Amino acid sequence: QVSDVSVDDLVTMMVGRTVQNTYQHEDAPDSYDGEEVIFEVKNLSRKDNKVKDVSFKLHKGEIVGFSGLVGSGRSEMMNSIFGAEPKSSGEVFIKGKKVNIKSPYSAIKNGLAMVTENRRETGFFHNFDIKQNISILPFIKSSTLGGAGGLTSSKFEKECAEAQKKSLNIKCYSVDQGITELSGGNQQKVILGKWVAADSQIIIFDEPTKGIDIGSKSEIYTLMRKLADEGKGVLVVSSELPELLAVCDTINVFREGRIVKTFPHREATEENIIKASTADIA
C-alpha cells in the first residue's frame, strides 16, 4: 500500500540506492570544538532589527544549520554576511582573519558563496548555457579587471564546466545545453558548480532543495557533506526540519532576529527545535 511506503523507500526507488548513510552523518563527533574555526560571526546586527547581536562559529568538517519561523531573521542574516544587505555592526572572520564585506563582490573575493533561495531569479543567467553559467564566476573572481570586462576563452569554459559536470553528476547531454532546459535539481548543481569552480571556501545554502525532486535532494545532501569533508565551510538555512536534522552537525534556532538555542545533532529533534522556535527558552 502507498501508506506503507516511507520517504527513504521513495528515494531508493527513484535513485536506485538506499539513502541510509547516503548523506546522514551518523558517525559525527559529539563536538567539533577541537577543530579549526574556519568561519566566525561576532555580534552581527542590522538597523532594521531583523538581526540582533548574532554570534556563531563554524568548524572545519562541520555543517551548521539555521532553523526558525519565516521572518525570524535567518535569511536576513545570511544576506548581511554576504554583503547583499547592510549590517549596522558585527565582525566576520575567515580562518581567524577579519574580513570587511560590504558587497557580494567583496564576499566572493574573500571566498564566500551563496546558493540563494530563488535560483530562477538570482541563481543563474537564463540566456547562458551550462558552461557559461559555471565558468563566469571563476573568471570574474580571477579577473584583474574586477569583472568589468574581458572574455572567457571557450577552452576555459569547456574544461571548467566538464570538471563540475563530472564532480557533481550534472545530468545533461552537453555543457553547451541551455540551463533552463535542466531539471530543478540539476540547475541547483550548476549553481553549486560555479561556486566550487571559483574555489569558494564558505558556502551558504538558503533553502537548498526548495522545489526539487526527492532524488535530487539526496544528491544535494551528499554534495554538502562532501564539501564539508574537503574542509570547506557549509552553512544551511532551511524550513524543512528533516533536512536540517539529516545533514547538519549543529543547528542554531532563530527567533525574532536572535539565536535562541543551539543543538548538537545528537540532541536535535523536531520537537525541541519547534519549541525553541516558538516559545521562551528556560
Image (cartoon, rainbow, N blue to C red):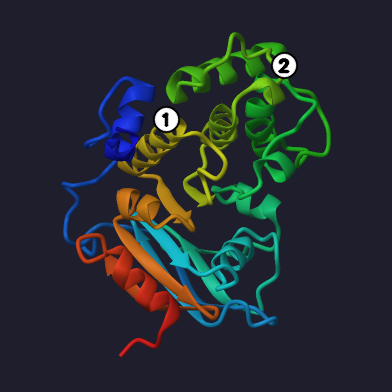
Where in the figure is residue 269, as x and y percent of width and height?
A: 27, 64
Label 2 neighbour load within 10 Å: few <14, some 14-19, many 20+: few
| Residue that badge 1 annotates | 215
Considering only vertical position in the picture, is 205 above or below 98? above
Considering only vertical position in the picture, is 183 above or below 85? above
Disc 1 element: helix
Q: Residue at x 70, y 70 (%)?
A: 86
Of the 4 image quadrants, the one containing the N terminus is top left
Q: Residue at x 17, y 60 (%)?
A: 30
| Residue that badge 2 annotates | 153
Where in the figure is residue 69, as x and y percent of width and height?
A: 51, 70
Q: Nearer the viewer, residue 168 or 195?
A: 168
Q: Nearer the viewer, residue 6 or 193?
A: 6
Disc 2 element: loop
Where in the figure is residue 136, as x and y percent of width and height?
A: 69, 30
Mark 2 in CB contact with mark 1 (< 8 angstroms)? no
Where in the figure is residue 222, as x and y percent of width and height?
A: 35, 35
